[in-house]
Image (cartoon, rainbow, N blue to C red):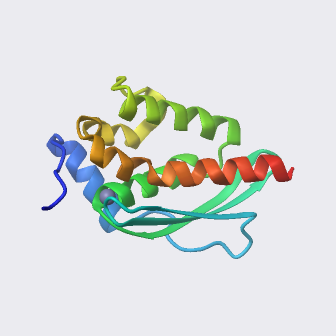
Amino acid sequence: MPNPEPQFDDLYRELILDHYRRPRNRGALENATQRVEGLNPVCGDEIHLDLRIHDGVIEDIAFEGNGCSISQSSASMLTDRLKGVTTEEARRVMAKFRAMLMKGEPPDPELGDLEALEGVAQLAVRVKCALLSWNVLQEGLTEAETAA
Ligand code: ZN
């Protein structure tokens, strides 16, 4: 059985497909300080995230992956939103994104394009797709903080 698809309005659907077809910051970083990865076996999604973190700032970020449009567009939007920000801001955006998907809270303006994924909250099985790259990110941030 195919995975159920959430309902998105047209504008949001376009934005999600745009990130899926033309992913931002795709690839690997030569000088990454953290390399982290994760799987979502329920859907077969896979994300590898490279981070270059210095003095509490995400100086560069890139991802590679395979999987459904929700998992890959979420990763693309993540890198777009968090490149160049402090790890503190990254954690704040991550908390707001999770609150939108897991608690059904309305999207916070700080989420930017990520608000397009709001409709995913209706389908618990697809929430795992949208959160995969963020769980990977959290591992990278924690690793950077404990290494410091
Ligand atoms: Zn998926």
The correct choice, above or below, for 109 with respect to 44 in the image is above
Q: Is residue 79 left or right of residue 88?
A: left
Could you tell me which residue is drawn at 74 percent across and 47 percent down?
Answer: 57
Horizontal and vertical percent position of residue 129 = 36, 53
The correct choice, above or below, for 1 with respect to 90 in the image is below
Viewer-proximal residue, 55 or 128? 128
Q: Is residue 130 left or right of residue 39?
A: left
Horizontal and vertical percent position of residue 112 = 43, 38
Count of marks, rendered view? 0
One can see residue 32 in this view: yes
Residue that extends furthest to the left in the rendered view of this protein = 1
Q: Is residue 72 left or right of residue 95?
A: left
Quadrant of the rendering where the N terminus is positioned: bottom left
Could you tell me which residue is drawn at 69 percent across and 35 percent down?
Answer: 88
Residue that extends furthest to the right in the rendered view of this protein = 148
Q: Is residue 118 left or right of residue 93?
A: left
Could you tell me which residue is drawn at 35 percent across and 23 percent down?
Answer: 106
Could you tell me which residue is drawn at 78 percent across and 44 percent down?
Answer: 56
Horizontal and vertical percent position of residue 75 = 45, 56
Residue that extends furthest to the top in the rendered view of this protein = 105
The correct choice, above or below, for 28 with respect to 143 in the image is below
Residue 127 in which image quadrant: top left
Horizontal and vertical percent position of residue 98 = 45, 35
One can see residue 80 in this view: no
Q: Quadrant of ligand 1?
A: bottom left
Viewer-proximal residue, 4 or 23? 4
